[in-house]
Amino acid sequence: MENLNEIIVDAQWTSGACAVGVATLETLAGGPPSVDLTYVLPNAKSAIVFGFALDQELIDRYLRKEDRLSHEQDNIRVNLLASGTALFGEKFLKELGHDAYAICANTVYRNDVPGGSAVMMPDLSLRYLAVASGIAHFGLSGNVITKNEGAGIIFGAIVTSAELEPTPPLPDEDDYCDDCKLCVASCASSMMDPDGVERVTLGGKEYTYSKRRTYHRCDFVCGGFTGLHPSGTWSTWSPGRFLIPEAEEEFYPALAMAVQASVNRPQIEGGYRHPMLPDRRIALTCGNCHLICVADKAERAKRYKALRESGCVVQNPDGSLEVVSAEEATERLAAMDPEKRLMYESF
């Protein structure tokens, strides 16, 4: 089938994708284990990679702490859309006589690595696949970015035995990341090392982004267990106020303590099921480093200012979240019954 590339790529465009590209074994060569296509499909030759945009207006309201639930619902919807599109693409390729494997947009982890699924290593890294397929750049944070969507994009992929033509990486001059470090400043957990650099080679081309510290930092904050920024002046959408450790070795014990302490908190409206904590919904409370990044530098600064001035979140007895000043949040927690207060902070 001479025009297989065109057919397969067009199938993703018709699904509503905002970006589509192709990576191959050659264009991924030299990369880490998480780009090994044969891990999921032994006879793999190519991967079709695509992205779906998040609603930027809802992101803005989320960062301002005007509306949490709408962005969460959009995020869940877009993740499911990307995963469903991958499944459709798998079936489509199989109907054409090619082996194929759908890569879920999120929450699929390898069990055969040290630490098992708890380390949350994906079956394949969609970030790396997106860069290698020429539809995104690496931002300083390690999130991947596009000119139109910034980092507000969710990726999916289909791995296949079909030998497709790769799309070239994006030219360096089109990368809008200027190391403004607002992604670093917006992360309450200090996930990104401000001085360290991660280097990765894909298809003979080297890419760099900020070295990441222990992923338990992200688990602690993005998991919603705590959210107070070290400055004490603003928080994520989490009502948790457990202190964020400085030392890496202190993070797992701190995370384990916070998970246990938060079990009896009232359920936040909305949320989603995660395989790491299947008996309780997890609410989307952070993702700031991801959401703050857009091509327009003035808009980036505006979003960061809004986040920094957005106040702190506290939880009412009925489970609802309320945004108050940092001073009022401190007073509210201090006035709590000690047993209930321990669900949110150590004192």
Image (spheres, rainbow, N blue to C red):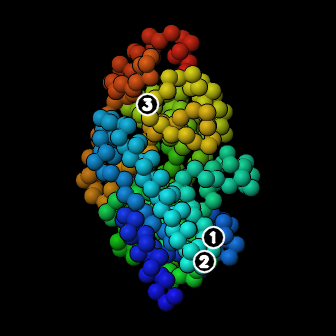
**3 or 1: mark nearer the eye:** 3
- The residue under the point 59% across, 29% down is 258
Alpha carbons under labels 1 and 2: distance apart: 15 Å
Q: Residue furthest bottom?
A: 2
**Is residue 83 shown above or below 207?**
above
Residue 93 locus on image (x, y percent): 55, 74
Q: Is residue 258 visible?
A: yes
Element assignment for label 2? loop
Alpha carbons under labels 2 and 3: distance apart: 43 Å
Is residue 299 found left or right of 153 in the rendered image? left
Say which label, 2 or 3, has the lower sequence index: 2
Residue bearing mark 2: 98
Residue 246 locus on image (x, y percent): 57, 37
Q: Quadrant of residue 255?
A: top right
**1 or 2: mark nearer the eye:** 2
Q: Residues within 10 Å of mark 2 (few under 14, many from 20)?
A: some
Say which label, 3 or 1, has the lower sequence index: 1
- The residue under the point 34% across, 59% down is 149
Q: Is residue 200 visible?
A: no
**2 or 3: mark nearer the eye:** 2
Label 2–label 3 contact, CB within 8 A: no
Going by the numbered disc 2, the residue's amino acid type is His
Element assignment for label 1? helix
Element assignment for label 3? loop
